[in-house]
Image (tube, rainbow, N blue to C red):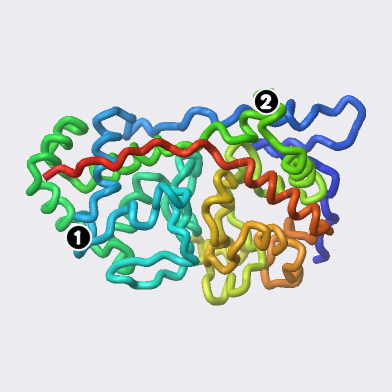
Amino acid sequence: MGRPFPRRGLWAIATLGVLVAAPALGAPSLREVFGGLGLLPDVNVPYANPTTPAKVELGKRLFFDPRLSGDGKLACVSCHVPGLGWADGRSTGIGFQGRVLKRNVPSVLNAAYYSGFFHDGRAASLEEQALGPLFNPDEMNATASQVVATLSRSPGYRQRFQEAFGTEPTIDGVGKALAAFERTLISKNSAFDRWVQGDDASMTPQARRGLELFTGKADCTACHKGSNFSDDKYHNIGVAGSGTKDKGRFDVTGDPDDLGAFKTPSLRNVALTGPYMHDGSIATLREAVKHYEEVDLDFPNIDPLIDHWGLTDEEIDDVVAFLESLTGEPLEIEVPRLPE
């Protein structure tokens, strides 16, 4: 089957996949289109885990506490560092006792808007995702009984579990509290957000040119849709080793169409979270954009959405400037005092 005709000159912007032809007489401006989408709607909170201040405060302490790991030395925050965009700045993560992991650490910022978690989507909820690293022998290498025993020895944690859940420490409560905290990690008020809301000075002319390329010639919105700039789906984009060294989504579904496919990440704060791709094989944001100009379009099982855009070096710089405008205000997170 031949490759589909590239959708140049179309804006695949809305989460619902609405295409708005451009340029066209009377077509809405980019500001009107994005403003109509709404910027970062309220987070959907599951009925089984309503958010409460007590639960968030408990989850925050658990996130920063290395006692949850098998050797008491590794916390969630060890890999999701606030000053590094809530990622870790490495090509791939470092796990239990220094083990080198095979995948790049994704940021937890705005993860609350996803429907699947990890690069391969193997977790269906934030609650499930939160517990995954705890029990992975290559990551935090703990067991449920060990975590519960550790927390139960702490009068402070026993009190906080009573306040949050009305129970003694449980592993279910650990997952729910961590998820409740992570749902508060929302990045807002980027230069792009302020521009959509009418602040013309917030985005540079270069960033605005980059936005036009992002939604037009480059067709990035084929995958990076909506207010969180992710379609929440999985694609093989031709990164070396995809489907061989790492089978990606295929290991979860067994579907041949998922071979070498990985989750589309949000582009919010992407300038803070390099290196890039599921394996951290691309060092800079500029190289990540240029990947799509150099990728082998005959790569095995490459997604048909992937195409060469024909961007010039100057245009690549413009797209990077737009991506940098998606950096939100830093979250003011005070390192908590851990219960004794």
**Is residue 268 placed above or below 238 in the rendered structure?**
above
Amino acid at the residue labelled 2? Asp
Please report the residue visible at 78 percent of the width from the left and 51 percent of the height from the top: 218
Q: Is residue 12 visible?
A: no
| Residue 97 x, y percent position in the rendering | 28, 70
Please report the residue visible at 29 percent of the width from the left and 28 percent of the height from the top: 52
Asked if the residues shown at circle 1 and circle 2 are in contact, with their CB atoms under 8 angstroms apart, the answer is no
| Element type where label 1 sits in the image | loop
| Residue 329 x, y percent position in the rendering | 51, 36
| Element type where label 2 sits in the image | loop
Determine crowd level at label 1: few under 14, some 14-19, many 20+ residues with C-alpha closer than 10 A. some
**How much space separates mark 1 and mark 2, taking CA atoms?**
47 Å
Please report the residue visible at 69 percent of the width from the left and 44 percent of the height from the top: 322
**Is residue 261 placed above or below 224 in the rendered structure?**
below
Quarter of image, res 179: top left
Q: In the depicted view, which residue is nearer to us: 208 or 289?
A: 208
| Residue 82 x, y percent position in the rendering | 41, 47
Determine crowd level at label 2: few under 14, some 14-19, many 20+ residues with C-alpha closer than 10 A. few
Q: Name the residue tied to disc 1.
A: 72
Residue 194 in the figure: left or right of residue 2: left
Q: Is residue 282 visible?
A: yes
Residue 96 in the figure: left or right of residue 310: left
- Disc number lying in front (1 or 2): 2
Amino acid at the residue labelled 1? Gly
**Is residue 328 placed above or below 219 in the rendered structure?**
above
Please report the residue visible at 32 percent of the width from the left and 71 percent of the height from the top: 98
| Residue 165 x, y percent position in the rendering | 20, 33
Q: Earlier in the sequence, mark 1 or mark 2?
A: 1
**Is residue 22 placed above or below 144 in the rendered structure?**
above
**Which of the image's four quarters has the C terminus?**
top left
Q: Name the residue tied to disc 2.
A: 199
**Which of the image's four quarters has the N terminus?**
bottom right
